[in-house]
Image: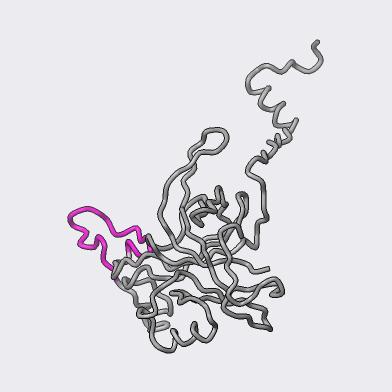
Amino acid sequence: MIRGLLGKKVGMTQTFDSEGNVIPVTAIEVGPCYVLGFKEKPMKIILGFELVKESALNKPRAGYFKKLGVAHLRRVQEFSSTDNKDYAVGQEIKADFFKAGDFVDVSGVSIGKGFQGGMKRWNWSGGPAAHGSMHHRRVGSIGASSDPSRVYRGQHMPGHMGMDNVTTQNLRVMFVDLENNLILVKGAVPGHKNGYLKVNKALKKAFRSLDEKREVVESKKNPMKQSKAAAKSGTSKPAGKK
């Protein structure tokens, strides 16, 4: 079984659960994905996503799809798998790979924010805000005197922010639209609108039905703390009296 599919971020919206609570969700177009090949040790499946004209590809990439005898695709990605016997080259995998209640790990490239200062990039608190400070948002001294006479590796400084590979784990699938190959995932995912994503089934959480309600476990009360609280309020009876 393959672990995940390629997708594209459509945008954010909201939905309602059975109790009428508003749930923010992200719509992700997952598929159709096409099987392009297999790898062994470790076991993987190569998937392609999003049909594209041949003129949009360079000759080596176009020749790759022509040799396989499949449609031209924009994105190609490898996914880990436990068994490749159920798949064949050219096979189409759609959004029904997921079901409502699944947990997924979504990977993508975060939104680029260009060159940013340290306060925005690293959440520095900044210097005093009074007029005489002269040090509000600046970096300040980064040296370390005569020992070690150098700047430590990894010092937080202004620089390029965003455009990093980010994975958001354990997002819950709230709805699956088979007709449009869409899934609604609770919460936000990395990247901008129309950004490409990898949607894998979560490793840390298993399927849980949306209709399942967790029992509220009442914490055990410490009798000693109860007696002390009663003594402070004056409701406890003095010793030796009925």
Magenta span contains residue 49: no
Q: Quadrant of residue 124?
A: bottom left
Q: Quadrant of residue 240?
A: top right
Q: Position of residue 131 (x, y in %)?
A: 18, 55
Seen as rendered, the residue at the extreme top is 242
Prevailing SS of the magenta stretch: loop
Q: Nearer the viewer, residue 81 or 104?
A: 81
Magenta span contains residue 134: yes
At a point 64% along the width and 23% down the height, the residue shown is 232
At a point 48% along the width and 42% down the height, the residue shown is 15
Q: Position of residue 210 (x, y in %)?
A: 63, 43
Q: Position of residue 165 (x, y in %)?
A: 46, 70
Seen as rendered, the residue at the extreme left is 131
Q: Which quadrant of the rendered structure holds the N terminus?
A: bottom right
Would you place residue 38 above or below residue 230 in this image?
below
Q: Nearer the viewer, residue 190 or 201?
A: 201
Would you place residue 55 above or below residue 11 in this image?
below
Would you place residue 217 above or below residue 144 in this image?
above
Q: Position of residue 238 (x, y in %)?
A: 75, 16
Instruction: Report whether 105 appears left or right of 203.
Output: left
Q: Which quadrant of the rendered structure holds the C terminus?
A: top right
Q: Nearer the viewer, residue 107 or 83?
A: 83
Instruction: Report whether 3 appears left or right of 8.
Output: right
Seen as rendered, the residue at the extreme front is 69
Q: How many tags in the picture? A: 0
- Residues in magenta? 119-140
At a point 66% along the width and 72% down the height, the residue shown is 87
